[in-house]
Structures are given as structure tokens and as C-alpha cells.
Image (cartoon, rainbow, N blue to C red):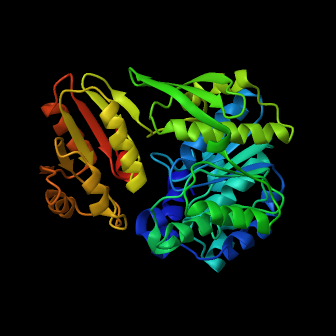
């Protein structure tokens, strides 16, 4: 098979959550175990860091990868979903895996695929593990796909576990309370593997503490050890000052990820770095500071308050659930513009009304949808939006919507594309 034929096979042969939603989610890790057994347990042959959370796990994963790379470690990075190219999911030192590897791996395990009928995600997890072994990485950052306890990635025994936060997302699969969602995320906490928790709530904290206690491991809450004393968002760049809670020592960091929500992720990353240093990894303050100024070029991170055009300002953000949209709205409030244009498309299994309720009514809206079965029809989205005084027109796809927004916008305006990872991924900029 060619690379394109291989990708078509993976996308269309296998149940894919991106495309069909809950029907592709397996509520056990049996298939991943079978795949890893067939590959001679690759997940046991490299060191790893496991990262879960409702929001922020992608940014946190990329920041940690950038830090480890800058410190001289050969670093694997597994994330999902991808925006443009399937190979974005599997990287070493910021470089996507080779097309030939994807072809060879798929051909090699095709008989097993036909036998056990795994999901797309189960295959890609096993593929990533195999690639990291072949590339002889020093360490790999493994981002959880969905939840934690039953996620396909939960076959690793990492150096460190990280849970960024708990929020409302995938309630149909993870549970309808924050305690239930926290329980699923806590499933990545392993015996004697330290765990770092980013943001905490009254509902999630006791769940995490109980799990850590049951497996006899240490638990650290990032927000208790350091705090943000100040930040500056200027010219779409972010500088943050962090203080130590015990000594009040202060260190400044400049981030090339400008979203103000990155201040929360930064605290989580810094606590993770501290825990890694305690385990013998060599990650100095200067390395951390240098790495955080160049996360995007080092790792290829996209879609987090990503600026693709100026005059007018065009920003992409993959935030799509309640907490993600709250963060976007906070960022909008910090931004300077004359008029605001919002291009939005969502998937049907999100809490669409609760998201729409958060969005600013003063913006001009461009309703559209990604070309996947899960996408909510743009007309339906527009009708729901009207209940919250959000007004605009329908466009056949995100690229047509962007052209319309560029036509209407003045130089001092801002255009924001948000609501769905898949919508942002279909932009051809």
C-alpha cells in the first residue's frame, strides 16, 4: 500500500472516535493489550510520562516535550487528534514519524487487525509505542485520548503521571458528575508512580487523594507549591511571573503559547519538572525558560490561540467544551479589536447550548461545520445560537467562512475560528 492507501485503510476500516463518536470508544483495554503482546510489549521498553485531563493536556504535553528536548533528551510525543496529517500524533524531537513506518507497521499487523477489529485509536497507540522503541527515545510523553482508566494508553508504567484538571466533557462516556469524571481520570495513577495534579476542585481532590493512597504513591497539587504573581499579555505574547509558595522566590517565564489559560498549564508543567528532577532527570531553570519560548517550533504545536494572519488578526483555537470556551472568552476580553468575527462549528455530542450561552453576543457569527458525521449541521447550530442572541449566516465550510470574514473585517478587527478541533483542522491556510 502507498501511504495514502494506508491512511485510508486506517480511517475507514477502523472505528474512529473523531468520525463517529461514542460508537468507536471501547470500554476496556483488551485490544491494546493484545496488540502490545503481538509487538513484544513495546510499552515496557521506554520511559514515559502519562498526561490526562479535560483541558490543557495537549499544551502541557508539548511544553514538557519541549523542555526535555532542550535538555538534550531524545523525546517521543504521542498526542491526539491531529489537525492536518495523521503523523502529527507520533513525533520524536518534534519530527513526525516517517510515512514508510506507518505503511510497514500497518502491513505487519494487518492480520491481527482483521482478527480482533481494534479501533483506530488502539492501533495508533500501539504504533506510537513501536515507533518510540525503534527510535530509542530517552523518554516519551503520552497524552491520554479520553478519560484515563479505560483509555488505550493506560498500559504504560510511567515515570510520572499528570492530571491537568477535571471539567465537563464526554459525560456520556465518563459520567455525569465531576466525581465520576475524576474517577476515570484517576485511573492513570499507578502504584509508586508520583502524580501531579494541576487544577483541583472540591469534587475532584478527594477522588485523587483516595486513589493515590490506595496505590501507595505520592500526590502533589501544583497550585499549592507555586502561584502566579503576575502576567502580561502584550502583542499576543505572554510573560508570566511565578512565585514559590514557601520561599516567595520569583521567576519569570516568557511563553510562545500566548493563551492566558497557559498560566494554569505552566504551574502544572513546573511541578512536573520538579518531580522529574527528583527522579534524576536534569532539567534546569535555564533549560525550562529557554524551552518555553519555543514550544511551537520545537514540537509543532498548533491551534492554541494560534495567530495565522494580522490586519485583521485571525486566531485559531481548538477549545471546544465548556471550560475551553470559557478560556477563549477570557482571552477575547483581553484582546484589542474594533469588531469581532467568530467562525464556529461544533460536534453534536458536546453541550452545545451551554457553550453558545458563553459566547459574546456583540460578535458577528459565521456558522459552519466540519465534514465528519459527528458535526452538527450549520443550520441547526445557527438556530440554537439565535436563542442566545448570536446572529450570523451559514457557510458551506470553514474556508468559505474565513474568506467571508476576511471580506467583512477591517484591519483593526479580530477573526476567531473555534468550536471544534476538526473545524480548525479543515482550514487550508
Identity of the residue drawn at 84% across and 54% down: 45
Identity of the residue drawn at 80% across and 66% down: 215
Residue 321 seen in the current view? no
Q: Nearer the viewer, residue 324 or 49?
A: 324
Residue 403 pos. (x, y %): 20, 37
Residue 29, compared with residue 196, is above or below; it is: below
Identity of the residue drawn at 67% across and 53% down: 128
Q: Nearer the viewer, residue 351 or 117?
A: 351
Going by the image, does 248 lie left or right of 54?
Answer: right
Q: Residue furthest right?
A: 280
The quarter of the picture where the N terminus appears is bottom right
Going by the image, does 408 lie left or right of 310?
Answer: left
Residue 373 pos. (x, y %): 34, 67
Identity of the residue drawn at 61% across and 38% down: 267
For residue 124, what is the image quadrant? Answer: bottom right
Residue 274 pos. (x, y %): 75, 37
Residue 174, compared with residue 282, is above or below; it is: below
The quarter of the picture where the C terminus appears is top left
Q: Nearer the viewer, residue 356 or 372?
A: 356
Residue 405 pos. (x, y %): 18, 37
Residue 397, compared with residue 172, is above or below; it is: above
Residue 49 seen in the current view? yes
For residue 92, what is the image quadrant? Answer: top right
Amino acid at each position: 500500500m502507498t501511504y495514502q492507501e494506508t491512511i485510508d485503510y486506517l480511517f475507514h476500516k477502523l472505528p474512529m472516535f473523531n468520525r463517529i463518536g461514542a460508537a468507536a470508544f471501547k470500554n476496556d483495554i483488551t485490544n491494546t493489550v493484545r496488540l502490545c503482546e503481538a509487538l513484544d510489549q513495546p510499552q515496557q521498553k521506554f520511559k514515559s510520562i502519562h498526561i490526562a485531563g479535560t483541558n490543557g493536556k495537549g499544551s502541557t504535553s508539548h511544553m514538557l516535550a519541549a523542555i526535555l528536548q532542550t535538555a538534550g533528551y531524545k523525546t517521543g510525543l504521542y498526542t491526539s487528534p491531529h489537525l492536518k496529517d495523521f503523523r502529527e500524533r507520533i513525533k520524536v524531537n518534534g519530527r513526525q514519524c516517517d510515512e514508510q513506518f506507518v505503511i510497514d507497521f500497518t502491513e505487519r499487523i494487518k492480520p491481527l487487525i482483521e482478527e480482533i477489529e481494534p479501533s483506530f485509536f488502539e492501533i495508533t497507540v500501539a504504533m506510537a509505542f513501536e515507533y518510540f522503541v525503534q527510535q530509542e527515545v530517552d523518554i516519551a510523553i503520552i497524552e491520554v485520548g479520553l478519560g484515563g482508566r479505560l483509555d488505550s494508553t493506560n498500559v504504560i508504567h510511567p515515570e510520572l503521571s499528570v492530571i491537568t484538571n477535571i471539567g465537563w466533557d464526554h459525560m456520556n462516556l465518563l459520567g455525569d458528575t465531576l466525581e465520576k469524571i475524576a474517577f476515570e481520570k484517576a485511573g492513570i495513577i499507578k502504584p509508586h508512580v508520583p502524580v501531579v495534579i494541576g487544577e483541583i476542585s472540591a469534587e475532584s481532590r478527594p477522588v485523587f487523594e483516595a486513589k493515590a493512597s490506595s496505590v501507595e504513591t505520592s500526590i502533589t497539587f501544583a497550585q499549592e507549591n507555586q502561584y502566579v504573581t503576575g502576567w502580561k499579555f502584550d502583542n499576543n505574547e505572554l510573560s508570566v511571573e511565578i512565585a514559590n509558595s514557601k520561599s516567595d522566590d520569583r521567576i519569570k517565564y516568557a511563553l510562545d503559547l500566548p493563551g492566558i489559560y497557559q498560566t494554569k498549564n505552566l504551574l502544572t508543567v513546573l511541578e512536573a519538572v520538579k518531580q522529574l528532577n527528583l527522579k534524576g532527570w536534569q532539567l534546569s531553570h535555564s533549560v525550562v525558560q529557554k524551552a518555553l519560548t519555543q514550544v511551537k517550533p520545537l514540537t509543532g504545536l498548533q491551534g492554541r490561540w494560534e495567530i495565522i494572519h494580522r490586519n485583521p488578526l485571525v486566531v485559531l483555537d481548538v477549545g471546544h467544551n465548556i471550560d475551553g470556551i470559557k478560556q477563549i472568552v477570557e482571552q477575547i476580553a483581553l484582546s484589542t479589536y474594533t469588531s469581532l468575527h467568530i467562525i464556529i462549528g461544533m460536534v453534536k455530542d458536546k453541550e452545545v447550548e451551554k457553550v453558545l450561552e458563553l459566547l459574546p453576543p456583540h460578535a458577528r457569527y459565521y456558522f459552519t461545520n466540519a465534514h465528519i458525521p459527528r458535526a452538527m449541521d450549520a443550520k441547526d447550530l445557527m438556530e440554537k445560537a439565535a436563542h442566545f442572541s448570536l446572529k450570523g449566516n451559514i457557510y458551506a465550510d470553514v474556508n468559505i467562512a474565513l474568506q467571508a470574514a476576511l471580506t467583512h473585517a477591517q484591519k483593526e478587527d479580530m477573526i476567531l475560528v473555534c468550536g471544534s478541533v476538526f473545524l480548525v483542522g479543515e482550514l487550508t491556510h
